[in-house]
Image (cartoon, coloured by chain):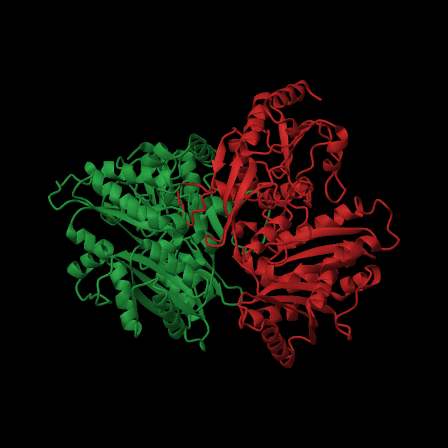
Chain colours: A red, B green
Amino acid sequence: MTDAETLLIEQARQNLDPKAVITDPKEIEPWVTDWRGRVHGAAPAMLAPASTDEVAHIVRLAAEHRVALVPQGGNTGMAAGATPPADGSALLLSMRRMNRIRSISSDNRLAVAEAGVVLANLHDAAHEIGMRFPLTLGARGSCTIGGLTSTNAGGTQVLRFGTMRSLVAGVEAVLPDGSVHNGLSGLKKDNRGYSIDQLLIGAEGTLGVVTAVALRLVPAIAARAVAWCGVENPERALSLLRYLEARTNSVEGFELVPQDSLDLVLRHVPNTRAPLTARHEWHVLIEATTTDPEADISAELERLLGAALQEEIIGDAVLAANEGQAEAFWKLRDSISEAERVEGQTLAHDISVPVSDMPAFIVEAAAKVESAFPGVVASGFGHLGDGNIHFHVRAASHAAPDWYSEEGANITRMVDDLVTAAGGSISAEHGIGQLKRDELARLAPPGRINALRAIKQALDPLGIMNPGKLVP
Amino acid sequence: MTDAETLLIEQARQNLDPKAVITDPKEIEPWVTDWRGRVHGAAPAMLAPASTDEVAHIVRLAAEHRVALVPQGGNTGMAAGATPPADGSALLLSMRRMNRIRSISSDNRLAVAEAGVVLANLHDAAHEIGMRFPLTLGARGSCTIGGLTSTNAGGTQVLRFGTMRSLVAGVEAVLPDGSVHNGLSGLKKDNRGYSIDQLLIGAEGTLGVVTAVALRLVPAIAARAVAWCGVENPERALSLLRYLEARTNSVEGFELVPQDSLDLVLRHVPNTRAPLTARHEWHVLIEATTTDPEADISAELERLLGAALQEEIIGDAVLAANEGQAEAFWKLRDSISEAERVEGQTLAHDISVPVSDMPAFIVEAAAKVESAFPGVVASGFGHLGDGNIHFHVRAASHAAPDWYSEEGANITRMVDDLVTAAGGSISAEHGIGQLKRDELARLAPPGRINALRAIKQALDPLGIMNPGKLVP
């Protein structure tokens, strides 16, 4: 522990609730390694404020003593953006004690949730008043509103409702100078200069600490229909999406699954079975919803898929007969990463290209990678309708234990080059964190890197907010 | 003209198309006074590039010679944000020659329009492919995509589709260092660091020059229904909005009009008549639309308003019987400012407060202003559903010619204080420009002012981009 850290912790103990200052290594230990277990950090203390005032106090102490802070929510990030440096040169700032939903209203269609509110708890609170917060993802039982905002998280319902950026109506944050930015009034129109809210969304805690967020709610779902379709190739999958979009507004989930991924799930995940009897090279999981209790959403989706079958856009389709079957279909999609882990080493790339280019990209990029690195299996699955797929590359069965860091690094560079050449993004929804910072530095235009650095330097001149993250 | 300006113009002449360098005062003169005729500037030259490359060249020259540029689109802004300083210390940068729609696609639901494309032309282009760009406002025949983006413009359809911020899928801009920021790929998900796009939206040309914008399109309207309702007070108007929102997604225009404003229009604007026979203290203009050619939107709106009448939320309602009548209803709303100008001196305030607080705010703020400044008439009209009204204060009939700048300035300060106390915005949709900079400096928290200044200094350290605008 540095002298500055010791001094800061001492002063924090004097001024804050005892619960807000944690130095017991056993309590800190679960939070210094990232979610995927790849990056191991260290922190001499974990500060856990319970109010915006306490956060502001901590940030002012950090500025005074030039001690860096690493804000952290549920620690479910995929880019190690909330993992402290290994040398103990920063303190963890856990936001999990700020877990109040300050207000929630169906009239205003807004909730104000503190940064530490777990997503699933917000879902429940919205449900209780007949509303819905429509963003969801696998980590919903752990991830927090502050982390979701700071990473501009996506998930499976982006097609209809957008990422966090579309759902955030305002942000409260402590800026690196210790001042409180209050954007929570939920104004629908406000043109008083640069949007600090928008700058904080996706800033991964490098420009300040998000303490609370005003979030848009939508009416609760009255019913959903879930279908599984077999298609010949990703091009047909996109045609199906266009076909549906031209005829209904009710599609909110549209996930592409290759047969290879389905095979892995069926092999490694208990209690799974293929929805369709015949094999198809590709599959699409569709979720359609309605807020109208009188609408028959299943009948609508069945009719549309029947027509798509007639027009030979799809090869086959089955509608989930009940909620249990709907859950079973989703489980197939949600278990792909888990099945891959059982199968062996897998490289994950979270990428996007323009939606209309995605079908060709998936096929061509996979062929190029498999040809350049014999033995590997490359495939893309996920949010086709957002132009965002998880492009995963599995090691050959005979791969060495260091395949991930050796050949893997070369594969990642190749994938990132292909994505960049296609005008796409090397981080569609997971952010940059520590893990993608070098690739961002390698591939972003110099003008963009200059702009990112200038903004960081302008708002955090002392470099106390999550240093070493996001900015190349 | 300064030596630096002379040198810049000389070099621009050598390197650019002759049409891009205008020094004839007669050609410049129409563009140096703001839309409302309140602020008079001067510019020794107007640069009119036709490509992003030409813009980048001009910005690099400006940086080299330390000459300021004032970007301008249709010159229809309400805050004099595109009016050059009166001392001729800056050059106009007219974007009107960059007027190409680079691409437009119903499949991708995207258009890429250059900064100088006039809004009405984009409307037409979208219409031709069966789509729609859903933002519109009174100046649509003159205002440009670059200006709309740089001011995060609103308008009458924000209720359903949001402001420009919601409709911009990507921005191309020349940053103050002359580098080109290209955000046009239209990626739906992209988390590669701070959003430069979002920073440029609403920056009023102070952080760079927007050169082209990717814009979201929505399906074209199959039919619309327009209704005029009489209500007792703004509270009832909001109840009507909530009533409709709970039952339909089709409402996209919801405009509040006080009887006083309607009276002025009927008195001063030819060929206008009141839609309802009885007098009501307040009125609401409603527009509902559908994209479904088989839906009967008029019948739906009629049924809902019938039910609202039964429940005594509204006092009376009439549906436009045809497009001519629909246009006539909208003309009443759109002519309020014109009628006020005929009546006498009027102060306009473009303000917002949280939607649910707006009814009380309108009534109470008007009473306070009328009591503090005897003889004036204060009233709020406009976008109630966005929490954004135009709060106008009319001079007493005996007011002196300098009322606007004398008592007017005191009234504006009072209105801005009331708005700020209510957690609202002193600029809901018109921006800050030059006209509201002092009030922003007076009312924004110091932390926010520091952040705005730091961002400006970081990205435009030479101060060449629209100096004297927006940043206090």
Task: Residue lying at the far front in this picture: please name it.
Answer: B311
Which quadrant holds the N terminus of chain B? Answer: top left
Q: Residue B54's x, y, as percent?
A: 42, 48
Please state if B403 lies on the left or on the right of B53 as rendered: left
Is B246 displayed left or right of A366 in the figure?
A: left
- Specify whether residue B444 is in view: yes
Count how many numbered circles sit on residues in the image.
0
Residue B142 in the image, given as x and y percentages of width and height: 31, 56
Left/right placement of residue B410 relative to residue A315 reads: left
Closer to us: B60 or B31 = B31
The quadrant of the image that shows the C terminus of chain B is top left
Residue B67 x/y as whole percent: 37, 36
Residue B32 in view here: no
Query: Hey, which residue is sitting farthest right in the picture?
Result: A398
When asked about the image quadrant of residue A472, the answer is top right
Q: Position of residue A187 (x, y in %)?
A: 43, 47
In this view, the residue farthest toward the bottom is A310
Q: Is residue A107 left or right of residue A259?
A: left
Which quadrant would residue A393 be assigned to in this image? bottom right
Q: Is residue B210 above or below residue B301?
A: above
**Near-viewer residue (A450 or B242):** B242
Residue B302, above or below A437: below
Q: Residue at x 39, y 69 (%)?
A: B304
Question: Observer-nearest residue: A128 or A306?
Answer: A128
